[in-house]
Image (cartoon, helix red, strand yellow):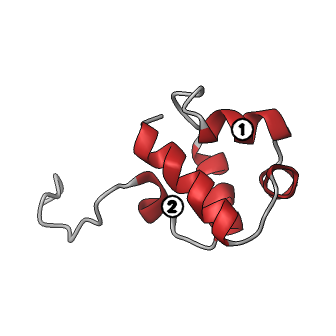
Amino acid sequence: MENDIANKIKQLRASRGLTLEQIANIVGVGKSTVRKWETSDIKNMRCDKIDKLAYALGVSPTYLMGWEESDGSNSFIS
């Protein structure tokens, strides 16, 4: 996981006054896993965990992960 995503997770959690344990309980992981996300010790995250983490932090998965919204102009289906 990139450092900017890790920083975003940490900043969002802190700004919402949530503890590592609270986020862990919402997402369904251990507190140590959330800490690893915040320190870039985990390089990837399952899609279902991204969705739950984004929900817990009150943002979209797209925003959380820094993905660009697609307008469909690069679609492979014609």
Camera-side residue of 39 and 52: 39
Element on which disc 2 rests: helix
Report the residue at 51% width, 49% height from top. Answer: 7
Image-based side of 12 in relation to 29, left or right = left
Q: To which residue does mark 2 refer?
A: 61
- Residue 70's spot in the image, x, y percent? 25, 65
43 up-or-down from 51: above or below: above
Mark 1 or 2: the one toward you: 1
Label 2 sits on what residue type?
A: Pro
Q: Is residue 22 above or below residue 17?
A: above
Q: CA distance from mark 1 to mark 2?
A: 19 Å
Q: Position of residue 56 (x, y in %)?
A: 71, 65
Place of residue 48 in the rendered image (x, y in percent of width and height, measured from the top left): 65, 49
Q: Give residue 67's position: percent from left, percent from top.
A: 34, 55
How packed mark 2 is, by other alpha carbons closer than 10 Å (few <14, some 14-19, many 20 or more), is some
**What residue sits 51% from the left and 68% below the top?**
60
Residue 3, placed above or below residue 76: above
The residue to which callout 1 is attached is: 35
